[in-house]
Image (cartoon, grey):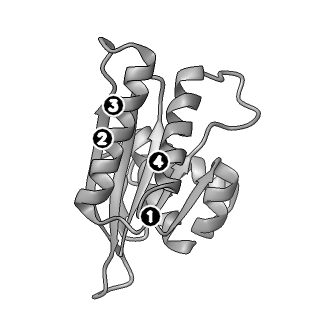
């Protein structure tokens, strides 16, 4: 089974696709990519572009479960573009072939991963961090978020 994890910013959407490796207990990282939302498009066109692109990705990889890391409710930096991108992703996932999905902030994600909340941030920031057999060190913070969300999506 393949899962996809999303992490949005105000100008990009990071995603990772993870496959459960039937040979071992570890997961296999299939893809870690970034969708750059074109600035040349007006805002509604950006949302449309994002929706079409994500729909194609889900179809291409045969994704069965998905997750998105949403902005923290207590965040002081509530960027309307990021929130809008997250909303488009959630709407698209809910109306796609994806069977189950998770839309959560760090609290829900760390619980699905089976780790304590204070263990999540080091996975995002520390050099040499690994989780479920995936070496996170070569990825930036947003890519790591997307990877961890994809892994958490297996637990739905």
On the image, the x and y values in percent for residue 135 come to 34, 59
Q: At which x and y percent is residue 22?
A: 31, 86
- Disc number at residue 114? none
Disc 2 residue crowd, few under 14, some 14–19, many 20+, Cα 10 Å: few
Whole-number angstrom distance, CA of label 1 to CA of label 3: 19 Å
Q: Name the residue beneath numbered marker 2.
A: 53
Question: Mark 3 and mark 2: span between their CA atoms?
Answer: 6 Å
Residue at 49%, 55% (x, y): give it: 95
Q: Earlier in the sequence, mark 4 or mark 3?
A: 3
Query: Does 79 sit above or below residue 56?
Result: above
Q: Are marks 1 and 4 in contact (CB under 8 Å)?
A: no
Q: Are marks 1 and 3 in contact (CB under 8 Å)?
A: no
Cα–Cα gap, marks 2 and 1? 15 Å
* Residues marked 3 and 2 touching at CB (< 8 Å): yes
Disc assigned to residue 92: 4
Whether residue 99 is visible, yes or no, is yes
The residue wearing badge 1 is 98
* Quadrant holding the N terminus: bottom left
Please, what secondary structure does the residue beneath circle 1 have? loop
């Amino acid at each position: 089974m393949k899962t996809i994890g999303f992490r949005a910013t105000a100008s990009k959407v990071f995603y990772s696709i993870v496959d459960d490796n039937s040979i071992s207990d570890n997961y296999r990282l299939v893809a870690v990519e970034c969708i750059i939302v074109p600035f040349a498009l007006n805002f509604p066109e950006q949302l449309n572009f994002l929706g079409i692109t994500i729909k194609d990705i889900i179809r291409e990889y045969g994704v069965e479960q998905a997750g998105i890391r949403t902005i923290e409710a207590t965040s002081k930096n509530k960027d309307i573009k990021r929130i809008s991108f997250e909303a488009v992703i959630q709407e698209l996932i809910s109306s796609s072939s994806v069977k189950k999905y998770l839309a959560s902030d760090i609290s829900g994600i760390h619980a699905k991963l089976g780790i304590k909340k204070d263990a999540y941030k080091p996975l995002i920031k520390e050099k040499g961090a690994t989780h479920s057999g995936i070496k996170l060190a070569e990825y930036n913070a947003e890519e790591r978020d997307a990877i961890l969300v994809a892994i958490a999506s297996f637990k739905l």
